[in-house]
């Protein structure tokens, strides 16, 4: 029997509020708040760097679609290919925010399953298209987005916490969460660990930017963002339960496997960015 005085009992409502028949889930709201914060930060950075307003306006659309599509496809392809890629029902659910029941009726559920690795790739592809279509320098855009990324990543993980998903392993630490929708075992709040880490990344990025604004456009901030996030992701995976059964047979889980290339690429661009800045 668990002593409830020792741990945090966690079972929030999935829905924040209703407007008529439409329900707004905490997870969706966290995504929107995170994206809004990034929007405001990058808008301010564009203004400080005297980039025309009309070049900023389409950026949010590119980022929103890139992150959402990439995160959704990343989860379906890397974590549940046996469900989403083996039947027409799964394929439809991969593309549309619905669930099709056994009798063929569909229900609006929102996108249940988004992967940060896929979201990162989707964002990069979207930014490549944005730069191609607007003529804004790629590295300037990537660095500005990187400075704001921590705010969005923080709120996405808070959304995971509200959903009681991506749970940690059983533990006896005094700050353990008992996720009642999962089981009655005290577990690491891995989502909260990540949210705090990403909030600190956001603060770190702003601090370095104020000291080294000339680094924008070199790829340094882009590299730092990748290196920080995915290094932390690699080690935080040790406190989290595997998301899919096949991961139990792997020496490291899928999240760690997918993190390693990002860590290497991030370190490379940090070094190259510093070298470029010294030549300016």
Image (tube, helix red, strand yellow):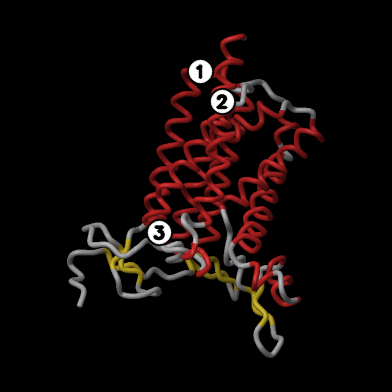
SS for tag 1?
loop
**Earlier sequence position, callout 1 versus callout 3:** 1
Q: Quadrant of the N terminus?
A: bottom left
Q: Is residue 78 shown above or below 56?
A: below
Picture coordinates of residue 34, whole percent (x, y): 53, 48
Callout 2 touching callout 1 (CB < 8 Å): yes
* x and y, in percent, of residue 199 in the image: 42, 41
Q: Which residue is mark 3?
A: 240
User: What residue sits right under mark 1 in the picture?
Assistant: 212
Dot label at residue 220 = 2
Alpha-carbon span between mark 3 and mark 2? 30 Å
Pinpoint residue 102: horizontal percent, then vertical percent: 66, 88
Estimate the spatial distance between the alpha carbons at disc 2 and disc 1, rounded to whole Å. 10 Å
Quarter of the image for residue 112 reads bottom right
Q: Nearer the viewer, mark 1 or mark 3?
A: 3
Within 10 Å of the Cα at label 3, are there few (<14), some (14-19), or many (20+) other Cα atoms? Answer: some
User: Label for residue 63?
Assistant: none
Residue drawn at 65 percent across, 77 percent down: 99
Element type at marker 3?
A: loop
Marks 2 and 1, the one that precedes in the sequence: 1
Q: Looking at the image, tell me whether mark 3 or mark 2 is earlier in sequence order.
A: 2
What is the quadrant of residue 21 in the picture? bottom right
The C terminus sits in image quarter: top right
Q: Residue at 57%, 56% (x, y): give it.
A: 115
């Amino acid at each position: 029997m668990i002593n409830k005085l020792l741990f945090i009992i966690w079972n929030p409502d999935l829905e924040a509020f209703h407007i008529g028949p439409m329900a707004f889930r905490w997870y969706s709201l966290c995504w929107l708040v995170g994206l809004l914060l990034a929007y405001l930060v990058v808008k301010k950075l564009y203004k400080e760097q005297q980039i025309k307003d009309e070049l900023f306006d389409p950026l949010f659309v590119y980022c929103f679609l890139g992150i959402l599509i990439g995160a959704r496809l990343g989860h379906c392809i890397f974590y549940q290919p046996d469900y989403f890629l083996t039947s027409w029902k799964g394929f439809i659910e991969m593309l549309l925010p619905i669930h099709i029941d056994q009798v063929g009726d569909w229900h609006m559920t929102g996108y249940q399953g988004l992967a940060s690795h896929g979201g990162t790739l989707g964002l990069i592809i979207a930014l490549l298209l944005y730069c191609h279509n607007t003529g804004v320098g790629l590295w300037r855009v990537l660095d500005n987005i990187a400075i704001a990324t921590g705010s969005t990543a923080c709120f996405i993980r808070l959304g995971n916490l509200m959903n009681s998903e991506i749970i940690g392993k059983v533990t006896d630490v005094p700050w353990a969460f008992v996720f009642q929708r999962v089981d009655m075992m005290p577990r690491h709040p891995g989502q909260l660990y990540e949210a705090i880490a990403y909030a600190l990344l956001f603060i770190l990025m702003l601090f370095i930017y104020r000291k080294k604004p000339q680094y924008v456009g070199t790829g340094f901030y882009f590299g730092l963002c990748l290196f920080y996030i995915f290094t932390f992701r690699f080690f935080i995976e040790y406190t989290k339960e595997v998301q899919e059964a096949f991961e139990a047979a792997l020496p490291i889980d899928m999240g760690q496997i997918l993190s390693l290339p990002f860590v290497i690429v991030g370190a490379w661009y940090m070094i190259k960015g510093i070298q470029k800045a010294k030549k300016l």
